[in-house]
Image (cartoon, rainbow, N blue to C red):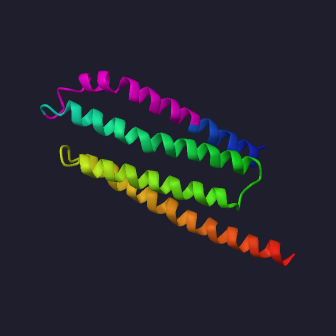
Amino acid sequence: MWNDKKSIALSKCCVVFFMALLLMCAILAPRGFRLWIDYMPEGRMAYFLTTVYLGSVPAAALLVLLFMLLNRLGRGQVFVGKNVESLRYISWCCFTGAVISLVSALYWFPWVAVGVAAAFMGLVVRVIKNIVAKAVSLQDEADLTI
């Protein structure tokens, strides 16, 4: 039977998978872009690598924060300030990725799609952060009442 514990375990496995995928992409980016060079705008290899490596920093931070958040959820720590803090930082990681992508659109326009998607995800996470922050506040009030 499926339960919360299995769901969190699956989520953690997915985060670890994406961590490995990010590491593999960072390592293989130069080789991958060399294969793609025929389709790449002339002389833009350094720009693409810069975008990938700069974008890897907030992506890695996001994945670590997400893993830590899932660990707390697994321990039953749902409405705690640390989760609000993690969600805040995760949204900042999304917005940072959006800025990197949108600036990169100056040399290759399709980065706009990545930037808009990252900004949208940042907004969604920000709204969820606000909901969790309110829940933490309500739980703190309830704890003081008892």
The residue shown at (81%, 75%) is 144
The residue shown at (39%, 52%) is 96
Quadrant containing the C terminus is bottom right
Drawn side of residue 120 relative to residue 38, left or right: right
Above or below 127: residue 78: above
Q: Nearer the viewer, residue 141 or 34?
A: 141
Q: Is residue 3 visible?
A: no
Quarter assignment of residue 119 = bottom left
**Residue 35's spot in the image, x, y percent?**
25, 22
Does the magenta segment cover residue 38?
Answer: yes
- The magenta region covers 16-41
The residue most toward the right is: 146
Q: Is residue 46 visible?
A: yes
Q: Main secondary structure of the magenta part?
A: helix
Drawn side of residue 9 relative to residue 44, left or right: right
Does the magenta segment cover residue 146?
Answer: no
Drawn side of residue 28 relative to residue 38, left or right: right
The residue shown at (24%, 22%) is 34
**Residue 18's spot in the image, x, y percent?**
51, 36
**Residue 50's spot in the image, x, y percent?**
29, 36
Above or below 88: residue 60: above
Drawn side of residue 88 relative to residue 139, left or right: left
Above or below 50: residue 128: below
Quarter assignment of residue 57 = top left
Q: Nearer the viewer, residue 57 or 115?
A: 57
**Residue 41's spot in the image, x, y percent?**
15, 35
The residue shown at (62%, 35%) is 13
